[in-house]
Amino acid sequence: QVQLVESGGGLVQPGQSLQLSCAASGGTFSTTAMGWFRQAPGKEREFVAAISWGGSGTTYKDSVKGRFTISRYNSKNTVYLQMNNLQPEDTAVYYCAAHRNSYGTASDVRKADNNNWGQGTQVTVSS
């Protein structure tokens, strides 16, 4: 089973940027679709962004389109989430997800019913 370790969270002011990283081990990263989800206090976990195993397909939550970018670096077994123009409503614990089946699509990850999960990293956007 793949292990996922997120990093890069922190406290930023509105309008600033952060880049989250998720390092994967114990699986075949290059054939694994990956994604990011988040959970704000008192709310359910929600989808943020996902990328297909080959990297050519991506999908985003509507409210982050144009601000967030997901990418993957297979030689480093790492997926990234570049977050620009952060807003207070982006405050949440961000979780990395890896689809359990090989050769998955971004939509497969988005369904969230067959993913492995990391422990999460806190992102706080506040002035």
Image (cartoon, rainbow, N blue to C red):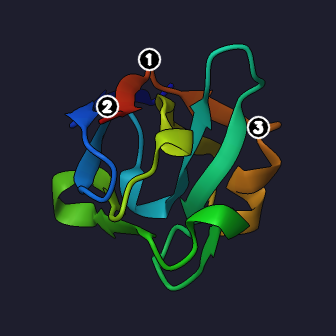
Circles 1 and 3, Cβ within 8 Å, touching? The answer is no
Return the x and y of residue 7 as percentages of the image width and height. Answer: 24, 32
Q: What amino acid is at disc 1? A: Gln
Q: Dot 3, crowdedness within 10 Å: few (<14), some or many (≥20)?
A: some
> Residue 14, labelled with which disc?
none
Q: Does residue 92 appear to the left or right of 125 in the view shown?
A: right
The residue pinned by badge 2 equals 6
Q: Nearer the viewer, mark 1 or mark 3?
A: 1
Q: Determine the CA span between mark 2 and mark 3.
A: 19 Å
Instruction: Please tell me which of labels 1 and 2 falls first in the chain.
Output: 2
Quadrant of the rendered image containing residue 3: top left
The residue pinned by badge 3 equals 114
The residue pinned by badge 1 equals 119
Return the x and y of residue 32 as percentages of the image width and height. Answer: 52, 55
Q: What amino acid is at disc 2? A: Glu
Q: Does residue 52 appear to the left or right of 21 in the view shown?
A: right
Quadrant of the rendered image containing residue 22: top left
Q: What amino acid is at disc 3? A: Asn
Q: Residue reaching furthest left? A: 76
Instruction: Please tell me which of labels 2 and 3 falls first in the chain.
Output: 2
Q: Dot 1, crowdedness within 10 Å: few (<14), some or many (≥20)?
A: some
Q: Residue at x 73, y 14 (%)?
A: 42
Circles 1 and 2, Cβ within 8 Å, touching? The answer is yes
Q: Report if residue 105 is visible in the image.
A: no
